[in-house]
Image: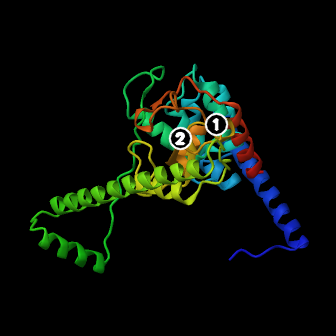
Amino acid sequence: MIAKLNNEEKALHQEFSSLARQYKQMKNRVLLALPRIRDARIAEKLGFDDIFDYALKVAGLPYTTVARALRLDKRLDKLPSLKAKIQDVGLSKVELVARVATRESEEMWVNKLDHMSKRAIESCVREFKNDDRSIEIARPCFAVNEVKKVKLTGEAQRLFNQLRVKMEKCSESEALEDMLRKLLRYENAQIEGFKNKKRMNAKKDQKNEPGVKKRVTRYVDVLTQRYILSRCAGLCEYTGCVQGFDNFHHKERFSSKKSHDSIVALCKTHHEIVHNGFIENEKDDIKDWRINFNMVNINLVDRKYLIKRLIARE
């Protein structure tokens, strides 16, 4: 439970947050200075064993952090704007972008570092590296997920074994596939039921108020939510993604169309990717979406979304 802070506590929190931001920026500036310290051989001139010994004793930086900073400096030798962003966003996000950035795409990635979370950037980079084609070519969207193992509890394992015996399957993988197919058939039947119910409600409204167009609010009605959740089974609908959904996303922005017909369910990461303009044909069916790292479109609504994110971080 989150309790409300009084004025004194709010002031203390704001002071601490401000100091934390300054601390991060100062640490990043120290990391940026390391390559110059190494090149000037200051550590050796002062009697330290090497740059790693110098950084540890003077700034308290561990070996791994110093090695990452020096390695990244070498990689970004021809990308000065990206290197300068280390001071603002730190090593981790810049390291991810450095894997795929070129001179042509440097400006675009520099802009994205301010707007996108580390998780969203990581997802973009993973998807880009999974394809051998050039960055100039748009390719079908397909999320590259980390392989995860699910550990069953004792009760879940017992239930699974009971179902496997009833299905007369010797292989665990065969039994699991059959269970998932049956569950999917059930979910598809649920979707059809919600579709029919929605059509009937629409006809009923039309019959009761002929010629009167019902006002649509930004609130997504329960029936529409149930239909979408049944369609996606509670998961992100981005092709290949297995994460749970977090947002109802309007492919055609609600502020423009005043309609919920184009809603798709997206996880937080892919919602970020879409609003950052990486999808070339967003209005098409989500299965046909194509991601393009070279052509980034950001409309007016998305700019407002990005500004709100930046303000929220302050």
Q: Does residue 140 sit above or below 145 in this rendering?
A: above
User: Which of the numbered marks, if any, corresponds to residue 198?
Assistant: none
Residue extending farthest right? 7
Q: Which residue is mark 2?
A: 262
Numbered disc 1: secondary structure: helix
Q: Amino acid at mark 2?
A: Ser
Labels 2 & 1 near each other (Cβ < 8 A): yes
Snapshot quadrant of residue 219: bottom right
Q: State the residue in front, 88 or 197.
A: 197
75 on left or right of 214: left
Snapshot quadrant of residue 45: top right
User: Which of the numbered marks, if any, corresponds to residue 257?
Assistant: 1
Residue 285 at x, y percent in the picture: 44, 35
Q: Amino acid at mark 1?
A: Lys
Q: State the residue in front, 220 or 106.
A: 220
Categorize mark 1 by other alpha carbons within 10 Å: few (<14), some (14-19), many (20+): few
Q: Is residue 68 visible?
A: no
Q: How is the image coloured?
A: rainbow
Q: State the residue in front, 92 or 9.
A: 9
Numbered disc 2: secondary structure: loop
Residue at horizontal 26%, vertical 59%?
180
Residue at horizontal 51%, vertical 43%?
122
Along the polypeptide, which appears first: circle 2 or circle 1?
1
Categorize mark 2 by other alpha carbons within 10 Å: few (<14), some (14-19), many (20+): some
